[in-house]
Amino acid sequence: MGRSSKYPDELRERAVRMVAEVRPQYSSQWAAITAVAGMLGIGTPETLRTWIRRSEVDAGQRPGVTSEIAAENKKLRQDVAELRRANEILKAAAIFFGAELDRPARR
């Protein structure tokens, strides 16, 4: 997944799997999430809930933008920003050198 987080990807995946496995033993998904978060030392149950939702989107079980598409969009936005910066530099250079050509030559 490649994100900078205090939780390794292996822990995230294990926690999501554990909630699915122990869910029948609890009255609600939230109760299962709270229990698993406590067992694994995850800061808050909400953190684990967001991992589960992301996992469901990535698996196609819930509507939303998958992690892969989100990463690709982020990369494309960075590329577009870089190209815009390059275009601005080229425009400034064209204006500068165009003005140089319009000036009479000194001897």
Image (cartoon, rainbow, N blue to C red):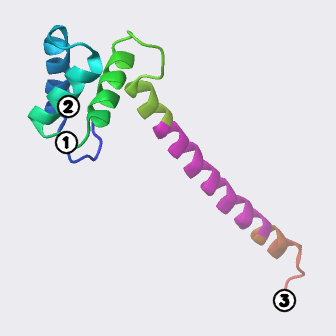
Q: Residues within 10 Å of mark 2 (few under 14, many from 20)?
A: some
Q: Circle 1 sits in a helix, a strand or a loop, which is it?
A: loop
Q: Residues within 10 Å of mark 1 (few under 14, many from 20)?
A: few
Residue denoted by label 2: 12
Q: Are marks 2 and 1 in contact (CB under 8 Å)?
A: yes
Q: Nearer the viewer, residue 58 or 62?
A: 62
Placement of 33 over or under 101, stated as above or below = above
Q: Residue 105 placed where, x, y %?
A: 85, 83
Query: Which stretch did the figure color magenta?
Result: 74-95
Q: Residue 44 placed where, x, y %?
A: 26, 40
The residue furthest front is 27
Residue denoted by label 3: 106
- Marks 2 and 1 sit apart, C-alpha to C-alpha, by 7 Å
Q: Is residue 57 left or right of residue 6?
A: right
Q: Residue 28 placed where, x, y %?
A: 27, 15
Q: Nearer the viewer, residue 102 or 64?
A: 64
Residue denoted by label 1: 7
Placement of 28 over or under 4, stated as above or below = above
Q: Is residue 5 left or right of residue 99?
A: left
In the picture, residue 46 is in which quadrant? top left
In the picture, residue 54 is in which quadrant? top left
- Marks 3 and 2 sit apart, C-alpha to C-alpha, by 70 Å
Q: Is residue 80 magenta?
A: yes
Q: Circle 2 sits in a helix, a strand or a loop, which is it?
A: helix
